[in-house]
């Protein structure tokens, strides 16, 4: 399933980088299970996007943000409920307003504890970061979209519908042309398919392609992915093209009634040939598994 993680998944707040005026990213530096974290400021308030995994990372991010905010009100949101994106939220409790889309809040309530157990099994460095995690209930929940006025800057939070998870959310900063995608986009690695039957089969390759097509139509100037380097709007097309190829190559084999294992083998070889430099090879197989299931449901 998921490979053991050997590097300590630690957020380095001191490496914060300014992407636009009053908008910084704490980059993940290519470290597994560290997300890109955003801090977006207005005259009145700041919004934090994702927390890092566990209270140690959450505390480091909160400390950075409290200093950055300089007295401004603090809001926290998370792109989806997965542990490295959302399981540091407790560090913000009482000091920030935590808001998310409803589907994500439901995802966290239904699957948060199960993911905590699963991630603890990913090796000692991950288990260490997850020590003392408490799952936090959001303070505010919206249905489809929410405009947050930070003072002189309005940020848009939107539920995309099921794609990488059941409750994915994207955050747009229109005046800076910035889009935070969470794990709908990763740079330099194969798309993460959390396809863990029978426990979690919410990821949808088909819907994911559709979500990326719509986001690409908006032509954001800067795309901040869940993991990997920040880039231009071409990142959206890169992931969409990969997912479409994965779908097509999987489905054409299923059409000819090829067995699942053979499909996995052939499609994996093809994808590695296409993207020899990409990390996260272990995510190809669950991707094929997900698309086989969606092929059967057509
Ligand atoms: Zn994720």
Image (spheres, rainbow, N blue to C red):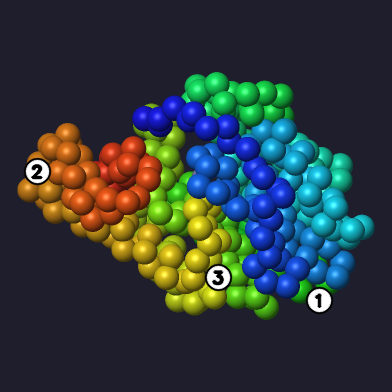
Nearer the camera: disc 3 or disc 2: 3
Crowding near pointer 2: few (<14 within 10 Å), some, many (20+)? few
The answer to whether residue 194 is seen in the rendering is: yes
Q: Residue furthest front?
A: 15
Residue 228 image position (x, y, % from top left)? 49, 53
Nearer the camera: disc 3 or disc 1: 3
Q: Secondary structure at mark 1?
A: loop
Q: Is residue 229 left or right of residue 265?
A: right
Residue appearing at x 32%, y 51% in the figure: 277
Looking at this view, is 105 or 261 the one in front? Answer: 261
Q: Is residue 171 left or right of residue 22?
A: left
Q: Secondary structure at mark 3?
A: strand
The residue beneath circle 1 is 152
Mark 3 vs mark 2, CA separation in Å: 42 Å
Mark 3 vs mark 1, CA separation in Å: 20 Å
Res. 4 mark: none
> Residue 171's quadrant in the figure?
bottom right
Res. 222 mark: 3
Q: If you read the primary sequence from the N terminus, does the residue marked by circle 3 or circle 2 appear first?
A: 3
Nearer the camera: disc 2 or disc 1: 1
Res. 257 mark: 2
Residue appearing at x 73%, y 73% in the figure: 21
Q: Residue furthest left?
A: 256
Q: Is residue 172 left or right of residue 6?
A: right
Residue 220 image position (x, y, % from top left)? 53, 74
């Amino acid at each position: 399933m998921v490979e053991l993680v050997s590097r300590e998944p630690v957020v380095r707040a001191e490496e914060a980088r300014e992407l636009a005026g009053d908008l910084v990213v704490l980059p993940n530096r290519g470290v597994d299970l560290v997300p890109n974290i955003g801090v977006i400021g207005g005259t009145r308030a700041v919004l934090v996007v994702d927390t890092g995994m566990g209270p140690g990372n959450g505390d480091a991010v909160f400390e950075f943000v409290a200093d950055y905010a300089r007295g401004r009100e603090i809001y926290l949101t998370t792109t989806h409920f997965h542990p490295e994106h959302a399981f540091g939220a407790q560090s913000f409790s009482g000091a920030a307003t935590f808001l998310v889309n409803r589907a994500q809040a439901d995802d966290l309530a239904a699957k948060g504890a199960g993911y905590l157990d699963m991630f603890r099994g990913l090796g000692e460095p991950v288990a260490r970061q997850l020590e003392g995690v408490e799952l936090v209930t959001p303070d505010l929940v919206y249905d489809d979209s929410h405009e947050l006025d930070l003072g002189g800057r309005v940020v848009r939070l939107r539920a995309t519908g099921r794609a990488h998870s059941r409750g994915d959310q994207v955050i747009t900063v229109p005046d800076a042309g910035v889009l935070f995608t969470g794990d709908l986009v990763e740079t330099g690695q194969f798309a993460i398919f959390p396809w863990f039957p029978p426990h979690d089969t919410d990821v949808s390759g088909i819907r994911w392609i559709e979500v990326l097509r719509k986001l690409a139509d908006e032509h954001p100037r800067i795309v901040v992915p869940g993991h990997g380097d920040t880039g231009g709007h071409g990142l959206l097309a890169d992931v969409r093209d990969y997912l479409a190829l994965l779908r097509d190559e999987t489905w054409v084999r299923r059409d000819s009634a090829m067995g699942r294992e053979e499909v996995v083998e052939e499609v994996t070889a093809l994808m590695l040939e296409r993207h020899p430099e990409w990390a996260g090879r272990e995510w190809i197989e669950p991707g094929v598994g997900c698309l086989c299931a969606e092929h059967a449901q057509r």
